[in-house]
Amino acid sequence: MSGTAREPRVVIVGAGVAGITALHVFRRRGFSDVTVLEKGSDVGGVWHWNRYPGLTCDVPSQLYQFGFAPKPDWSHIWASGTEIQRYHRAVVDDLGLDRFIRLDTEVVAAQWNDSESTWIVTIAGGESIVADVLVCATGVLHHPAVPDIPGLDDFAGEVVHTARWPDGLETDGRDIAVVGTGSTGVQVVSALVGGASTITHYVRSPQWILWAPMSLRQLAAVGSLLHRFPGVHDRLYRILLWGSGILADITTRPSWRRRAVQAYARLSLRVGVRDRELRARLTPTDEPLCKRQVVSGTYHRAIQRPNAELVTEKIIEVTRTGICSADGTTRDVDIIVLATGFEAHNYMRPMEIVGRVGRTLAQEWSAGPRAYRMTAIPGFPNLFTVLGPNSPTGSISLQYTSELTAEYIAQWLDRWRAGEVRSIEVTDEATDAFNADVAAAMGPTVWNTGCNSWYFSEGGSIDLFPYDRARLTAMLSVPDPSDFHLR
Ligand code: NAP
Protein backbone atom coordinates (compact mmCIF):
# COMPACT_ATOMS: atom_id res chain seq x y z
CA MET A 1 0.00 0.00 0.00
CA SER A 2 1.36 3.40 -0.77
CA GLY A 3 -0.15 6.85 -1.32
CA THR A 4 0.72 10.52 -1.14
CA ALA A 5 2.86 11.64 1.76
CA ARG A 6 1.47 14.59 3.69
CA GLU A 7 1.07 15.86 7.21
CA PRO A 8 -1.88 14.42 9.14
CA ARG A 9 -4.19 16.96 10.70
CA VAL A 10 -4.34 15.84 14.32
CA VAL A 11 -6.89 17.09 16.85
CA ILE A 12 -6.35 16.26 20.50
CA VAL A 13 -9.27 16.79 22.87
CA GLY A 14 -8.19 17.83 26.35
CA ALA A 15 -5.12 19.61 27.73
CA GLY A 16 -4.59 17.68 30.95
CA VAL A 17 -1.74 15.28 31.66
CA ALA A 18 -2.68 13.06 28.70
CA GLY A 19 -3.30 15.89 26.22
CA ILE A 20 -0.13 17.83 27.09
CA THR A 21 1.88 14.62 26.76
CA ALA A 22 0.34 13.71 23.41
CA LEU A 23 0.94 17.22 22.07
CA HIS A 24 4.56 17.20 23.18
CA VAL A 25 5.26 13.71 21.82
CA PHE A 26 3.68 14.48 18.43
CA ARG A 27 5.65 17.72 18.19
CA ARG A 28 8.82 15.88 19.20
CA ARG A 29 8.14 13.41 16.39
CA GLY A 30 7.89 16.30 13.95
CA PHE A 31 4.13 16.49 13.38
CA SER A 32 3.31 20.11 12.64
CA ASP A 33 -0.47 20.16 12.25
CA VAL A 34 -1.58 19.38 15.78
CA THR A 35 -4.33 21.26 17.61
CA VAL A 36 -5.46 20.72 21.17
CA LEU A 37 -9.02 21.71 22.00
CA GLU A 38 -9.60 22.29 25.71
CA LYS A 39 -12.92 23.33 27.19
CA GLY A 40 -11.37 24.77 30.37
CA SER A 41 -9.86 28.20 30.70
CA ASP A 42 -6.41 26.73 31.35
CA VAL A 43 -4.37 23.59 30.83
CA GLY A 44 -3.85 21.01 33.59
CA GLY A 45 -7.03 18.91 33.49
CA VAL A 46 -7.90 17.70 37.01
CA TRP A 47 -5.39 20.18 38.41
CA HIS A 48 -7.21 23.03 36.73
CA TRP A 49 -10.70 21.88 37.71
CA ASN A 50 -10.00 20.75 41.28
CA ARG A 51 -9.24 23.62 43.65
CA TYR A 52 -10.77 22.46 46.90
CA PRO A 53 -8.98 23.28 50.17
CA GLY A 54 -6.41 20.68 51.11
CA LEU A 55 -5.90 19.33 47.58
CA THR A 56 -2.59 17.50 47.61
CA CYS A 57 -1.30 14.78 45.32
CA ASP A 58 -0.70 11.58 47.24
CA VAL A 59 1.83 10.46 44.62
CA PRO A 60 5.35 11.75 45.40
CA SER A 61 6.02 14.89 43.36
CA GLN A 62 9.31 13.56 42.03
CA LEU A 63 7.27 10.82 40.35
CA TYR A 64 4.22 12.91 39.49
CA GLN A 65 5.95 14.76 36.66
CA PHE A 66 6.42 14.34 32.95
CA GLY A 67 9.48 12.27 32.06
CA PHE A 68 10.28 14.97 29.47
CA ALA A 69 9.93 17.90 31.88
CA PRO A 70 11.75 17.11 35.12
CA LYS A 71 11.18 19.45 38.04
CA PRO A 72 13.78 19.00 40.75
CA ASP A 73 12.61 21.79 43.06
CA TRP A 74 9.17 20.80 44.35
CA SER A 75 8.42 22.54 47.62
CA HIS A 76 6.96 19.40 49.23
CA ILE A 77 7.47 15.66 48.97
CA TRP A 78 3.75 15.50 48.10
CA ALA A 79 2.94 18.72 46.28
CA SER A 80 -0.24 20.76 46.58
CA GLY A 81 -2.74 21.00 43.76
CA THR A 82 -1.78 24.65 43.24
CA GLU A 83 1.90 23.85 42.76
CA ILE A 84 1.11 20.99 40.39
CA GLN A 85 -1.17 23.20 38.34
CA ARG A 86 1.55 25.86 38.11
CA TYR A 87 3.93 23.12 36.92
CA HIS A 88 1.58 22.11 34.09
CA ARG A 89 1.28 25.71 32.96
CA ALA A 90 5.07 26.15 33.11
CA VAL A 91 5.68 22.96 31.08
CA VAL A 92 3.34 24.18 28.35
CA ASP A 93 5.00 27.60 28.30
CA ASP A 94 8.58 26.32 28.46
CA LEU A 95 8.09 23.78 25.66
CA GLY A 96 6.35 26.35 23.47
CA LEU A 97 3.17 24.28 23.33
CA ASP A 98 0.75 27.10 24.07
CA ARG A 99 0.29 28.11 20.45
CA PHE A 100 -1.14 24.68 19.62
CA ILE A 101 -3.78 24.82 22.37
CA ARG A 102 -7.18 26.47 22.07
CA LEU A 103 -8.65 27.07 25.52
CA ASP A 104 -12.35 27.64 26.27
CA THR A 105 -13.11 25.42 23.29
CA GLU A 106 -15.51 22.59 24.03
CA VAL A 107 -15.88 19.74 21.59
CA VAL A 108 -19.50 18.63 21.51
CA ALA A 109 -19.46 16.14 18.64
CA ALA A 110 -17.29 14.31 16.16
CA GLN A 111 -18.49 12.47 13.07
CA TRP A 112 -16.48 10.06 10.95
CA ASN A 113 -16.63 10.77 7.22
CA ASP A 114 -15.86 7.40 5.67
CA SER A 115 -15.42 8.54 2.09
CA GLU A 116 -12.79 11.12 3.08
CA SER A 117 -11.39 9.13 6.03
CA THR A 118 -11.65 12.21 8.23
CA TRP A 119 -13.29 13.32 11.45
CA ILE A 120 -15.54 16.38 11.45
CA VAL A 121 -15.09 17.80 14.93
CA THR A 122 -17.80 20.19 16.11
CA ILE A 123 -17.14 22.81 18.74
CA ALA A 124 -19.78 24.39 21.00
CA GLY A 125 -21.03 27.40 19.05
CA GLY A 126 -21.05 25.52 15.76
CA GLU A 127 -17.51 25.76 14.34
CA SER A 128 -16.24 22.60 12.64
CA ILE A 129 -12.68 21.37 12.25
CA VAL A 130 -11.57 18.57 9.95
CA ALA A 131 -9.07 16.10 11.40
CA ASP A 132 -7.37 13.07 9.92
CA VAL A 133 -6.74 11.66 13.35
CA LEU A 134 -8.70 12.37 16.53
CA VAL A 135 -7.02 11.77 19.88
CA CYS A 136 -9.26 11.81 22.94
CA ALA A 137 -7.32 12.77 26.04
CA THR A 138 -10.42 13.66 28.00
CA GLY A 139 -9.43 12.17 31.34
CA VAL A 140 -11.07 9.80 33.76
CA LEU A 141 -11.92 11.75 36.90
CA HIS A 142 -13.59 14.68 35.22
CA HIS A 143 -17.37 14.58 35.35
CA PRO A 144 -18.52 15.26 38.94
CA ALA A 145 -20.92 12.66 40.36
CA VAL A 146 -23.74 14.47 42.13
CA PRO A 147 -25.71 12.13 44.41
CA ASP A 148 -29.42 11.84 44.04
CA ILE A 149 -30.35 12.88 47.59
CA PRO A 150 -33.96 14.05 48.08
CA GLY A 151 -34.15 17.77 48.82
CA LEU A 152 -30.59 18.61 47.73
CA ASP A 153 -31.78 21.11 45.13
CA ASP A 154 -33.90 22.98 47.69
CA PHE A 155 -31.18 23.43 50.29
CA ALA A 156 -31.09 27.09 51.33
CA GLY A 157 -27.32 27.20 51.92
CA GLU A 158 -24.51 26.44 49.53
CA VAL A 159 -23.97 23.08 47.84
CA VAL A 160 -20.47 22.64 46.45
CA HIS A 161 -18.94 19.72 44.59
CA THR A 162 -15.23 19.48 45.38
CA ALA A 163 -14.34 19.33 41.69
CA ARG A 164 -16.05 22.68 41.05
CA TRP A 165 -14.98 24.60 44.15
CA PRO A 166 -16.03 28.26 43.81
CA ASP A 167 -13.30 30.88 44.21
CA GLY A 168 -13.66 32.82 47.43
CA LEU A 169 -16.05 30.48 49.24
CA GLU A 170 -15.87 31.47 52.92
CA THR A 171 -15.66 28.40 55.13
CA ASP A 172 -14.21 29.80 58.34
CA GLY A 173 -16.69 29.99 61.21
CA ARG A 174 -19.36 28.11 59.29
CA ASP A 175 -21.14 24.81 59.86
CA ILE A 176 -20.12 22.43 57.11
CA ALA A 177 -21.26 18.97 56.09
CA VAL A 178 -18.93 16.87 53.96
CA VAL A 179 -20.42 13.88 52.13
CA GLY A 180 -18.01 11.16 51.01
CA THR A 181 -14.76 9.74 52.28
CA GLY A 182 -12.57 8.92 49.30
CA SER A 183 -9.21 10.66 48.83
CA THR A 184 -11.05 13.95 48.31
CA GLY A 185 -13.39 13.83 51.32
CA VAL A 186 -10.52 12.95 53.63
CA GLN A 187 -8.42 15.85 52.36
CA VAL A 188 -11.20 18.41 52.50
CA VAL A 189 -12.30 17.46 56.04
CA SER A 190 -8.70 17.71 57.24
CA ALA A 191 -8.29 21.12 55.61
CA LEU A 192 -11.56 22.70 56.77
CA VAL A 193 -11.78 21.45 60.34
CA GLY A 194 -9.35 24.04 61.69
CA GLY A 195 -11.40 27.07 60.61
CA ALA A 196 -14.96 25.79 60.46
CA SER A 197 -17.36 26.20 63.33
CA THR A 198 -18.38 22.55 62.93
CA ILE A 199 -17.66 19.78 60.44
CA THR A 200 -20.03 16.87 60.07
CA HIS A 201 -18.56 14.09 57.97
CA TYR A 202 -21.18 11.81 56.37
CA VAL A 203 -19.49 8.50 55.69
CA ARG A 204 -21.55 5.81 53.98
CA SER A 205 -18.71 3.28 53.75
CA PRO A 206 -15.52 3.97 55.72
CA GLN A 207 -12.27 3.60 53.83
CA TRP A 208 -8.86 2.42 54.95
CA ILE A 209 -6.44 5.29 55.31
CA LEU A 210 -2.67 4.82 55.11
CA TRP A 211 -0.89 7.24 57.38
CA ALA A 212 1.84 9.30 55.67
CA PRO A 213 3.37 12.69 56.53
CA MET A 214 1.77 14.46 53.58
CA SER A 215 2.89 17.97 54.56
CA LEU A 216 6.59 17.11 54.57
CA ARG A 217 8.65 19.79 52.83
CA GLN A 218 11.34 18.91 50.34
CA LEU A 219 14.61 20.48 51.51
CA ALA A 220 15.65 23.37 49.26
CA ALA A 221 19.15 21.87 49.22
CA VAL A 222 17.74 18.67 47.69
CA GLY A 223 16.08 20.70 44.91
CA SER A 224 19.34 22.56 44.19
CA LEU A 225 21.32 19.33 44.19
CA LEU A 226 18.93 17.61 41.80
CA HIS A 227 18.92 20.71 39.64
CA ARG A 228 22.72 20.73 39.51
CA PHE A 229 22.97 17.02 38.78
CA PRO A 230 20.26 16.10 36.25
CA GLY A 231 21.70 12.58 36.04
CA VAL A 232 21.00 12.02 39.73
CA HIS A 233 17.51 13.44 39.31
CA ASP A 234 16.88 11.14 36.40
CA ARG A 235 18.10 8.17 38.46
CA LEU A 236 15.75 9.14 41.31
CA TYR A 237 12.84 9.40 38.86
CA ARG A 238 13.60 5.95 37.50
CA ILE A 239 13.82 4.45 40.97
CA LEU A 240 10.41 5.94 41.81
CA LEU A 241 9.02 4.67 38.53
CA TRP A 242 10.33 1.21 39.37
CA GLY A 243 8.85 1.55 42.88
CA SER A 244 5.46 2.42 41.46
CA GLY A 245 5.75 -0.77 39.41
CA ILE A 246 6.13 -2.72 42.66
CA LEU A 247 3.02 -0.96 43.97
CA ALA A 248 1.10 -2.08 40.88
CA ASP A 249 2.17 -5.61 41.67
CA ILE A 250 0.80 -5.28 45.22
CA THR A 251 -2.67 -4.68 43.87
CA THR A 252 -2.57 -7.17 41.02
CA ARG A 253 -1.26 -10.29 42.79
CA PRO A 254 -1.47 -11.62 46.34
CA SER A 255 1.89 -11.46 48.05
CA TRP A 256 3.50 -10.74 51.39
CA ARG A 257 3.95 -7.14 50.18
CA ARG A 258 0.20 -6.78 49.75
CA ARG A 259 -0.37 -8.21 53.22
CA ALA A 260 2.24 -5.83 54.67
CA VAL A 261 0.52 -2.76 53.19
CA GLN A 262 -2.84 -4.04 54.42
CA ALA A 263 -1.40 -4.55 57.90
CA TYR A 264 -0.05 -1.01 57.80
CA ALA A 265 -3.51 0.32 56.91
CA ARG A 266 -5.01 -1.49 59.93
CA LEU A 267 -2.20 -0.20 62.12
CA SER A 268 -2.77 3.36 60.87
CA LEU A 269 -6.35 3.17 62.13
CA ARG A 270 -5.47 1.49 65.41
CA VAL A 271 -2.78 4.06 66.23
CA GLY A 272 -4.68 7.01 64.80
CA VAL A 273 -7.96 6.43 66.63
CA ARG A 274 -7.71 5.25 70.23
CA ASP A 275 -11.44 5.47 70.99
CA ARG A 276 -12.83 1.98 70.36
CA GLU A 277 -16.34 3.06 69.46
CA LEU A 278 -15.15 5.66 66.94
CA ARG A 279 -12.59 3.20 65.56
CA ALA A 280 -15.29 0.59 65.05
CA ARG A 281 -17.35 3.09 63.08
CA LEU A 282 -14.31 4.00 60.97
CA THR A 283 -13.44 0.38 60.22
CA PRO A 284 -14.25 -0.64 56.65
CA THR A 285 -15.84 -4.00 55.90
CA ASP A 286 -13.66 -4.55 52.82
CA GLU A 287 -9.95 -5.24 52.50
CA PRO A 288 -7.38 -2.43 52.43
CA LEU A 289 -6.37 -1.57 48.82
CA CYS A 290 -9.65 -2.89 47.39
CA LYS A 291 -10.71 0.69 46.68
CA ARG A 292 -8.29 3.37 45.52
CA GLN A 293 -6.15 3.65 48.62
CA VAL A 294 -6.62 6.82 50.64
CA VAL A 295 -3.45 8.34 52.11
CA SER A 296 -3.52 10.99 54.82
CA GLY A 297 -1.46 12.14 57.74
CA THR A 298 -4.18 14.32 59.23
CA TYR A 299 -7.66 12.82 58.86
CA HIS A 300 -7.78 10.67 62.00
CA ARG A 301 -6.71 13.63 64.12
CA ALA A 302 -9.19 15.91 62.31
CA ILE A 303 -12.23 13.71 62.88
CA GLN A 304 -11.42 13.52 66.61
CA ARG A 305 -11.42 17.29 67.08
CA PRO A 306 -14.20 18.67 69.30
CA ASN A 307 -15.86 20.50 66.39
CA ALA A 308 -15.91 17.40 64.15
CA GLU A 309 -18.57 14.71 64.07
CA LEU A 310 -18.66 11.44 62.15
CA VAL A 311 -22.08 10.32 60.92
CA THR A 312 -22.21 6.81 59.49
CA GLU A 313 -26.00 6.58 59.33
CA LYS A 314 -27.48 6.79 55.86
CA ILE A 315 -28.51 10.22 54.60
CA ILE A 316 -32.30 10.27 54.27
CA GLU A 317 -32.84 13.74 52.89
CA VAL A 318 -31.59 17.27 52.73
CA THR A 319 -33.94 19.77 54.34
CA ARG A 320 -33.95 23.52 53.68
CA THR A 321 -31.44 23.93 56.52
CA GLY A 322 -29.47 20.73 56.90
CA ILE A 323 -29.12 16.99 56.49
CA CYS A 324 -31.42 14.39 58.03
CA SER A 325 -29.86 10.96 58.60
CA ALA A 326 -31.35 7.56 59.38
CA ASP A 327 -30.94 8.03 63.15
CA GLY A 328 -33.66 10.68 62.83
CA THR A 329 -31.33 13.61 63.54
CA THR A 330 -31.24 16.68 61.35
CA ARG A 331 -28.01 18.63 61.59
CA ASP A 332 -28.28 22.20 60.36
CA VAL A 333 -25.38 23.39 58.22
CA ASP A 334 -24.42 26.38 56.07
CA ILE A 335 -22.52 24.50 53.39
CA ILE A 336 -22.85 20.98 52.00
CA VAL A 337 -19.64 19.79 50.39
CA LEU A 338 -20.11 16.88 47.99
CA ALA A 339 -16.90 14.86 47.95
CA THR A 340 -18.83 12.22 46.07
CA GLY A 341 -16.40 11.50 43.27
CA PHE A 342 -16.80 11.27 39.54
CA GLU A 343 -18.62 9.57 36.71
CA ALA A 344 -15.32 7.92 36.00
CA HIS A 345 -16.39 5.85 33.01
CA ASN A 346 -17.81 8.61 30.86
CA TYR A 347 -14.47 9.26 29.15
CA MET A 348 -15.38 11.27 26.02
CA ARG A 349 -19.11 11.11 26.68
CA PRO A 350 -21.31 13.20 26.52
CA MET A 351 -19.53 14.27 23.32
CA GLU A 352 -21.58 12.74 20.52
CA ILE A 353 -19.06 10.65 18.62
CA VAL A 354 -20.49 8.96 15.55
CA GLY A 355 -18.41 6.17 14.04
CA ARG A 356 -18.10 4.40 10.72
CA VAL A 357 -21.50 2.70 10.63
CA GLY A 358 -23.40 5.62 12.11
CA ARG A 359 -23.54 4.33 15.67
CA THR A 360 -22.58 6.62 18.52
CA LEU A 361 -19.98 5.88 21.15
CA ALA A 362 -22.75 6.08 23.76
CA GLN A 363 -24.57 3.25 21.93
CA GLU A 364 -21.40 1.19 21.58
CA TRP A 365 -20.58 1.66 25.25
CA SER A 366 -24.07 1.21 26.67
CA ALA A 367 -22.81 -1.83 28.62
CA GLY A 368 -19.64 -0.06 29.71
CA PRO A 369 -16.51 1.26 28.03
CA ARG A 370 -14.54 -1.18 25.90
CA ALA A 371 -11.34 -0.54 24.00
CA TYR A 372 -8.31 -2.32 22.59
CA ARG A 373 -5.17 -1.87 24.70
CA MET A 374 -6.64 1.30 26.21
CA THR A 375 -6.22 3.13 22.88
CA ALA A 376 -8.54 2.12 20.03
CA ILE A 377 -12.24 1.31 19.59
CA PRO A 378 -13.79 -0.88 16.87
CA GLY A 379 -16.08 1.11 14.59
CA PHE A 380 -14.17 4.36 15.23
CA PRO A 381 -11.29 4.56 12.73
CA ASN A 382 -8.43 7.00 13.28
CA LEU A 383 -9.65 7.67 16.81
CA PHE A 384 -7.29 6.98 19.67
CA THR A 385 -7.56 7.45 23.41
CA VAL A 386 -4.81 8.39 25.83
CA LEU A 387 -5.67 7.14 29.35
CA GLY A 388 -8.69 5.40 27.86
CA PRO A 389 -10.59 2.38 29.29
CA ASN A 390 -8.49 -0.02 31.42
CA SER A 391 -5.59 2.41 31.71
CA PRO A 392 -3.63 1.83 34.88
CA THR A 393 -5.12 4.82 36.67
CA GLY A 394 -4.78 3.21 40.09
CA SER A 395 -1.15 2.20 39.95
CA ILE A 396 1.42 2.87 37.22
CA SER A 397 2.49 6.48 36.61
CA LEU A 398 -0.10 8.35 34.52
CA GLN A 399 2.61 10.40 32.88
CA TYR A 400 4.54 7.28 31.89
CA THR A 401 1.40 5.63 30.50
CA SER A 402 0.46 8.77 28.58
CA GLU A 403 3.88 9.09 26.97
CA LEU A 404 3.96 5.42 26.03
CA THR A 405 0.49 5.67 24.50
CA ALA A 406 1.33 8.85 22.61
CA GLU A 407 4.45 7.19 21.16
CA TYR A 408 2.27 4.25 20.11
CA ILE A 409 -0.17 6.57 18.34
CA ALA A 410 2.74 8.47 16.78
CA GLN A 411 3.81 5.25 15.06
CA TRP A 412 0.43 5.16 13.33
CA LEU A 413 0.81 8.84 12.49
CA ASP A 414 4.17 8.03 10.89
CA ARG A 415 2.51 5.48 8.64
CA TRP A 416 -0.27 7.91 7.83
CA ARG A 417 2.27 10.63 6.98
CA ALA A 418 4.17 8.24 4.73
CA GLY A 419 0.95 7.60 2.81
CA GLU A 420 0.81 3.92 3.79
CA VAL A 421 -2.56 4.14 5.54
CA ARG A 422 -5.50 6.51 5.55
CA SER A 423 -7.89 4.59 7.80
CA ILE A 424 -6.84 2.62 10.89
CA GLU A 425 -9.55 0.66 12.67
CA VAL A 426 -9.02 -1.96 15.32
CA THR A 427 -10.85 -5.24 14.78
CA ASP A 428 -13.65 -6.53 16.99
CA GLU A 429 -11.77 -9.82 17.43
CA ALA A 430 -8.62 -8.17 18.75
CA THR A 431 -10.67 -5.99 21.09
CA ASP A 432 -12.67 -8.95 22.40
CA ALA A 433 -9.51 -10.99 22.93
CA PHE A 434 -7.87 -8.13 24.84
CA ASN A 435 -10.92 -7.63 27.05
CA ALA A 436 -11.29 -11.37 27.72
CA ASP A 437 -7.64 -11.51 28.84
CA VAL A 438 -8.10 -8.48 31.06
CA ALA A 439 -11.26 -9.91 32.65
CA ALA A 440 -9.47 -13.20 33.38
CA ALA A 441 -6.50 -11.39 34.88
CA MET A 442 -8.75 -9.48 37.30
CA GLY A 443 -9.24 -12.66 39.37
CA PRO A 444 -6.30 -12.31 41.77
CA THR A 445 -6.40 -8.51 41.95
CA VAL A 446 -7.25 -6.88 45.24
CA TRP A 447 -9.94 -4.81 43.47
CA ASN A 448 -11.85 -8.05 43.06
CA THR A 449 -12.10 -8.85 46.77
CA GLY A 450 -15.60 -7.55 47.39
CA CYS A 451 -15.84 -3.78 47.53
CA ASN A 452 -17.68 -1.23 45.52
CA SER A 453 -15.70 1.62 44.02
CA TRP A 454 -15.32 3.87 41.01
CA TYR A 455 -13.06 1.19 39.57
CA PHE A 456 -16.21 -0.73 38.50
CA SER A 457 -17.79 0.41 35.25
CA GLU A 458 -21.52 0.41 34.60
CA GLY A 459 -21.20 -3.04 32.99
CA GLY A 460 -19.78 -4.42 36.25
CA SER A 461 -16.25 -4.99 34.98
CA ILE A 462 -13.20 -3.52 36.68
CA ASP A 463 -11.94 -0.67 34.55
CA LEU A 464 -8.26 -0.92 35.49
CA PHE A 465 -5.04 -2.49 34.26
CA PRO A 466 -4.35 -5.87 35.92
CA TYR A 467 -0.74 -6.27 34.76
CA ASP A 468 2.61 -4.71 35.53
CA ARG A 469 4.55 -1.95 33.85
CA ALA A 470 6.62 -4.33 31.75
CA ARG A 471 3.42 -5.76 30.25
CA LEU A 472 2.06 -2.27 29.65
CA THR A 473 5.27 -1.30 27.89
CA ALA A 474 5.24 -4.43 25.76
CA MET A 475 1.59 -3.91 24.82
CA LEU A 476 2.11 -0.37 23.60
CA SER A 477 5.63 -0.48 22.19
CA VAL A 478 4.85 -1.45 18.61
CA PRO A 479 1.39 -1.57 16.96
CA ASP A 480 0.39 -4.97 15.66
CA PRO A 481 -1.11 -4.38 12.17
CA SER A 482 -2.84 -7.77 12.22
CA ASP A 483 -5.18 -6.41 14.91
CA PHE A 484 -6.36 -3.62 12.59
CA HIS A 485 -8.32 -3.09 9.39
CA LEU A 486 -6.07 -0.81 7.36
CA ARG A 487 -7.08 1.10 4.28
P1 NAP B 1 -14.49 8.47 45.44
O1 NAP B 1 -13.24 7.78 45.81
O2 NAP B 1 -15.32 7.90 44.36
O3 NAP B 1 -15.34 8.61 46.77
C1 NAP B 1 -16.66 9.08 46.75
C2 NAP B 1 -17.20 9.05 48.14
O4 NAP B 1 -18.51 9.59 48.13
C3 NAP B 1 -17.31 7.65 48.73
O5 NAP B 1 -17.01 7.70 50.10
C4 NAP B 1 -18.79 7.32 48.49
O6 NAP B 1 -19.31 6.36 49.38
C5 NAP B 1 -19.39 8.67 48.75
N1 NAP B 1 -20.73 8.82 48.21
C6 NAP B 1 -21.08 8.83 46.91
N2 NAP B 1 -22.41 8.99 46.80
C7 NAP B 1 -22.90 9.08 48.06
C8 NAP B 1 -24.19 9.23 48.59
N3 NAP B 1 -25.26 9.33 47.82
N4 NAP B 1 -24.33 9.27 49.95
C9 NAP B 1 -23.24 9.15 50.74
N5 NAP B 1 -21.99 9.00 50.29
C10 NAP B 1 -21.81 8.96 48.96
O7 NAP B 1 -14.22 10.01 45.01
P2 NAP B 1 -13.01 10.98 45.37
O8 NAP B 1 -12.74 10.98 46.82
O9 NAP B 1 -13.29 12.27 44.71
O10 NAP B 1 -11.78 10.30 44.72
C11 NAP B 1 -11.83 9.85 43.39
C12 NAP B 1 -10.44 9.57 42.94
O11 NAP B 1 -9.77 10.78 42.65
C13 NAP B 1 -9.55 8.91 43.96
O12 NAP B 1 -9.82 7.56 44.12
C14 NAP B 1 -8.20 9.21 43.38
O13 NAP B 1 -7.93 8.34 42.33
C15 NAP B 1 -8.41 10.61 42.85
N6 NAP B 1 -7.94 11.59 43.83
C16 NAP B 1 -6.62 11.61 44.05
C17 NAP B 1 -6.14 12.49 44.96
C18 NAP B 1 -4.68 12.47 45.19
O14 NAP B 1 -4.25 12.86 46.24
N7 NAP B 1 -3.89 12.00 44.22
C19 NAP B 1 -6.96 13.35 45.66
C20 NAP B 1 -8.31 13.30 45.41
C21 NAP B 1 -8.80 12.41 44.49
P3 NAP B 1 -19.35 4.80 48.99
O15 NAP B 1 -17.93 4.33 49.12
O16 NAP B 1 -20.28 4.21 49.95
O17 NAP B 1 -19.86 4.73 47.57
Image: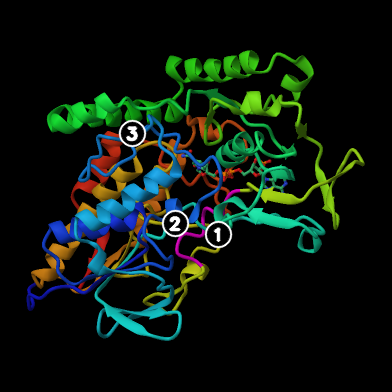
Residue beneath disc 2: 370
Going by the image, does 161 lie left or right of 114?
right
Identify the mark at residue 92; answer none if there is no mark. none
User: Is residue 420 visible to us here?
Assistant: no
Q: Is residue 380 left or right of residue 80?
A: left
Image quarter for ligand 1: top right
Would you name the residue on which mark 1 appears? 367
Element type where label 1 sits in the image: loop
**Amino acid on which disc 1 is placed:** Ala
Q: Quadrant of residue 329?
A: top right
Q: Mark 3 highlights which residue?
A: 468
Q: Main secondary structure of the magenta part?
A: loop
Amino acid at dot 2: Arg
Three-letter code for the amino acid on which mark 3 is drawn: Asp
Q: CA distance from mark 1 to mark 3?
A: 27 Å
The magenta segment is 341-349
Which mark is first along the chain, 3 or 2?
A: 2
Towards the viewer: 107 or 451: 107
Residue visible at 45% across and 29% down? 251
- Badge 2 residue CB within 8 Å of ligand 1: no
Q: CA distance from mark 1 to mark 2?
A: 9 Å
Q: Label 3 near label 2: C-beta < 8 Å?
A: no
Structural distance between the alpha carbons of marks 2 and 3? 20 Å
Say what secondary structure mark 3 lies in: loop
Image coloring type: rainbow
